[in-house]
Image: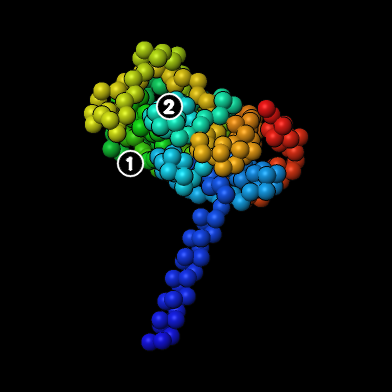
C-alpha cells in the first residue's frame, strides 16, 4: 500500500510540475490546424526566444480557443488570423472587447475551389458552376451514390462554414457531398488522386505548398461583390445556413499576426516585434513546403530560417 501511495504522490507531483512549467512560459503561441500557421508560429517562437530572451511555449487550439485564450490571458499570440474568414472573432475580441490587437502588416491570400489540371482538361470543369451540373459532378463520385465528393476543409475552420454557404448558394450542395476532414487527410487524398489521375475537387488556398507540388486549377467564379456576400454567425443565428448567401468569389484575403492587448504591458518588445513581422506569399509557401513535403521538424526549420534571414528579422526588431 505504501508503495502505491508513494507512486501516486510522485505522479501527482509530476503533473503539477508539468503544469508549473507550462504556466511559467512568458508567452504562449497558439497553433491552429493548418500548415502555414504552424510554420509561422515556430518562426515567431524562435525569434522571441533568441532575440528577446523570453520563454515561449506553443499550444495547439482552434481559432475560438486561441482567441478566448488571448482574451483570458492563458494564450498570447495567434500566428495567422485570416480575414475575412475570422470576422466574427475579429469583431468580438478586437473591436468589442479590445483584448486582442491585430497587426497592420498582412500577407495577401486567395481562397476558392480547385480541381487537378487533369480533371479540368478531361471533364471540361473550369467554373464553379460546373459542380452543380449533375452530368459533370458525377465525375467526382467514388461511392456510387450519384453525387460527387468535395473536400471543403477541416471541421474547425471558419472557411469550412463559409464553403457550406457557398455550396448552398451556388447549388453544388445538392450535387456534391461536402466532406470535412483534417488537412493532412485531404492532402494525402489529393496526392493519391493525382498519382492515379482520379478526378478530385477540393477547397484550396494560397499561400500553400500545394500549388508548387501539383498542377491544380482554381475554378472560375463571378468576382467578389460585398452586396452578394452575407455570412451570418452560427453563434448568433440558428438558421445561419439558410439565411446566409455567397454566390460570388471570395474577396482578396489577408493573413495577420494577432496578440493579446496585455502583452504590450507585460512584454512591450515582443508586442512591438509581433506588430512588425512582415512575411510574403512566396516565403509562407516555402515554409509550408519544407515542413509538410520535405518533412522537416517545424522547430528545426524555424531555427534554420531565422538564422538564414537574420537581416529580415533585424528589420522587424528595428521597426518603429
**Which image quadrant is residue 44 in?**
top right
**Which image quadrant is residue 285 in?**
top right
Q: Name the residue tied to disc 1.
A: 143
Residue 79 shows in the view: no
**Quadrant where the N terminus is found in the figure:** bottom left
**Label 2 neighbour load within 10 Å: few <14, some 14-19, many 20+:** some
Which of discs 2 and 1 lies nearer the camera? The answer is 2
Question: In front here: 138 or 243?
Answer: 243
Mark 1: secondary structure: loop
Question: In front here: 294 or 149?
Answer: 294
Check if mark 2's residue and mark 1's residue have beta carbons within 8 Å. no
Q: Residue at x 31, y 25 (%)?
A: 232
Q: Which residue is the extreme one toward the front?
A: 265
| Model colouring | rainbow
**Number of numbered discs visible in the structure rendering:** 2
**Which image quadrant is residue 84 in?**
top left
Residue 309 shows in the view: yes
**Label 1 neighbour load within 10 Å: few <14, some 14-19, many 20+:** few
Q: Residue at x 48, y 34 (%)?
A: 100
Q: Residue at x 56, y 37 (%)?
A: 264
In the image, residue 48 lies at what x, y percent? 64, 44
Question: Residue 192, relative to residue 81: is it above or below?
Answer: below
Distance of label 2 from label 1 (alpha carbons): 46 Å
Question: Residue 231, relative to residue 56: is it above or below?
Answer: above
Left or right of 241 on screen, residue 271: right
Q: Name the residue tied to disc 2.
A: 95
Q: Residue at x 28, y 38 (%)?
A: 145
In the image, residue 190 lies at what x, y percent? 49, 39
Question: In front here: 198 or 176?
Answer: 176
Mark 2: secondary structure: helix
**Quadrant where the C terminus is found in the figure:** top right
In the image, residue 199 lies at what x, y percent? 44, 33
Amino acid at each position: 500500500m505504501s508503495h502505491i501511495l508513494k507512486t501516486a504522490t510522485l505522479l501527482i507531483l509530476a503533473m503539477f510540475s508539468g503544469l508549473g512549467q507550462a504556466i511559467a512560459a512568458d508567452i504562449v503561441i497558439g497553433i491552429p490546424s493548418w500548415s502555414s500557421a504552424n510554420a509561422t508560429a515556430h518562426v515567431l517562437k524562435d525569434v522571441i526566444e533568441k532575440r528577446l530572451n523570453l520563454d515561449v511555449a506553443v499550444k495547439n487550439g482552434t481559432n475560438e480557443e486561441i482567441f478566448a485564450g488571448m482574451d483570458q490571458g492563458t494564450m498570447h499570440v495567434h500566428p495567422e488570423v485570416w480575414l475575412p474568414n475570422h470576422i466574427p472573432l475579429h469583431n468580438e475580441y478586437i473591436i468589442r472587447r479590445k483584448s486582442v490587437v491585430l497587426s497592420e502588416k498582412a500577407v495577401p491570400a486567395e481562397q476558392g475551389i480547385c480541381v487537378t489540371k487533369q480533371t479540368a482538361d478531361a471533364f471540361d470543369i473550369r467554373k464553379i458552376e460546373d459542380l452543380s451540373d449533375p452530368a459533370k459532378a458525377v465525375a467526382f463520385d467514388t461511392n456510387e451514390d450519384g453525387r460527387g465528393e468535395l473536400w471543403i476543409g477541416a471541421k474547425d475552420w471558419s472557411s469550412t462554414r463559409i464553403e457550406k454557404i457557398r455550396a448552398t448558394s451556388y447549388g453544388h450542395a445538392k450535387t456534391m457531398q461536402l466532406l470535412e476532414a483534417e488537412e493532412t487527410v485531404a492532402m494525402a487524398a489529393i496526392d493519391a488522386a493525382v498519382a492515379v489521375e482520379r478526378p478530385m475537387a477540393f477547397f484550396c488556398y494560397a499561400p500553400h505548398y500545394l500549388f508548387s507540388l501539383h498542377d491544380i486549377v482554381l475554378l472560375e467564379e463571378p468576382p467578389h461583390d460585398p452586396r452578394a456576400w452575407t455570412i451570418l454567425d452560427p453563434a448568433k443565428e440558428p438558421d445561419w445556413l439558410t439565411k446566409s448567401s455567397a454566390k460570388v468569389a471570395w474577396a482578396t484575403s489577408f493573413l495577420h499576426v494577432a496578440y493579446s492587448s496585455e502583452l504590450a504591458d507585460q512584454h512591450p518588445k515582443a508586442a512591438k516585434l509581433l506588430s512588425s513581422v512582415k512575411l510574403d506569399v512566396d516565403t509562407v509557401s516555402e515554409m509550408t513546403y519544407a515542413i509538410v513535403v520535405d518533412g522537416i521538424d517545424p522547430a528545426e526549420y524555424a531555427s534554420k530560417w531565422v538564422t538564414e534571414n537574420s537581416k529580415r528579422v533585424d528589420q522587424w526588431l528595428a521597426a518603429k
